[in-house]
Image: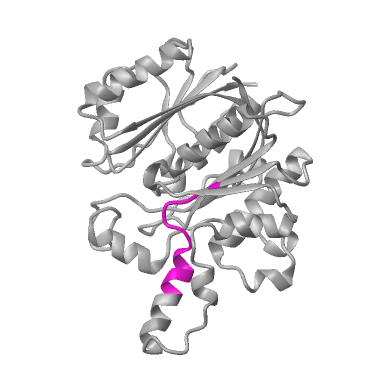
Amino acid sequence: MKVYIRSAGNISPQHSLDTDSFFLSRTTTSNNYFKSVEPDYDSFIDSKMIRRMSRIVKMGVTAAITCLKEAHVEIPAAIVTATAYGCLEDSSSFLRRMIEFDEKLLSPTAFIQSTHNTVGAQIALMLKCHNYNNTIVHRGLSFENALTESILLLKEGTRPVLVGAMDEITDDSQAILSRFGLYRKTDNRMGNIAGEGAAFFLLEKDQGKKSLAILKGLHILYKPESNKAIQHSLLEFLKEKETTLDQIGLILTSHTGNKKMDEQDKELMNSVFRNKVTFPFKSLCGDYPTASGFALWMGSVILKEQMAPFWMEHGPQFPLSNILIHHHSGNSHHSFILISES
């Protein structure tokens, strides 16, 4: 079954809420992590509600509203959200208050808003949507599993489906995760540059007039035995989708510049991806478990516009028919997403 991406909304470290700005300018960082470029939320959310929302909730809600407005849809038939870390800012706030108040007389607000399904619930409350609502929490494959569930819902006749992914970075989470060597510390160049973002998509079974792209296939691979196993899995996936590597004009990779984490990427680029046009999408959004949401947005708008961003060197040739996304998190959670021109 073909799945059409009708519209999308994306808040990221790039100017991605406005597609034109994304194609014309690229944002970089001098820090050890990327922060999202946030819009004026008053244009999207009632000012009285904004005061009660944390950053990740505002980012997720705004991305979802933008996505629905582009498709001229008021209420989706289902809402599926994905996150690995949840609302870190509220979690930190709650834990700090536990210590400060000696676990007594605690306000429940921060705890209530720290749960992983806060964004999905807030979207439903704002839209007054009483339809199916679920949040997937599965580490580096959270968004991929949310896409899988969305496809199953479409097959059952639930349409359209609003699906999105979001994760945030805070000073506390950056300090903790960098201790484990996952993200880069201030005093050295080891580890990935952390990032954050919120990306939402409206999925349909029918093409419609303004579809961004076609979600042609999705494949998940957990803890592959070797680099050869990754290559074999990729080739089998493409064979199943009746697509050859020659038909893929652009490959978005998870290459981060971290030697330890990039070994599998290098192996692929020296073998099956040799002589192919590749681009490391995490150099734009940073590294976080649901970064594949940013990659799917980026690939979709490139296919829709049939042009590469102004700042992209050695970009693909046009017309462009297919884009492959290889996302991996921690060298254990791998996924391949194949999208094509609508």
Residue 329, can we see it? Answer: yes
In the rendered view, would you say 44 is above or below 90? above
Q: Locate residue 56, reporting x and y percent.
A: 54, 60
Q: Locate residue 209, reporting x and y percent.
A: 77, 26
What residue is rendered at 55% in x and 64% in y? 55
Drawn side of residue 65 relative to residue 3, left or right: right
Q: Which scheme is used to colour this image of the protein?
A: one colour
Highlighted magenta segment, given as a residue range: 81-93
Residue 90 colored magenta? Answer: yes
In the rendered view, would you say 306 is above or below 201? above
Q: How many marks?
A: 0
In the rendered view, would you say 4 is above or below 56? above
What residue is rendered at 38% in x and 47% in y? 139
Residue 146 colored magenta? Answer: no
What residue is rendered at 77% in x and 42% in y? 73
Drawn side of residue 19 relative to residue 169, left or right: right
Near-viewer residue (244 or 318)? 244
Q: Locate residue 176, reporting x and y percent.
A: 29, 64
In the rendered view, would you say 62 is above or below 321? below
- Split into 4 quadrants, where in the image is the N terminus? top right
- Split into 4 quadrants, where in the image is the C terminus? top right
Q: Residue furthest front?
A: 156
Residue 38, can we see it? Answer: no
Residue 236 occupies which quadrant of the picture? top left
Q: Locate residue 318, reporting x and y percent.
A: 57, 18
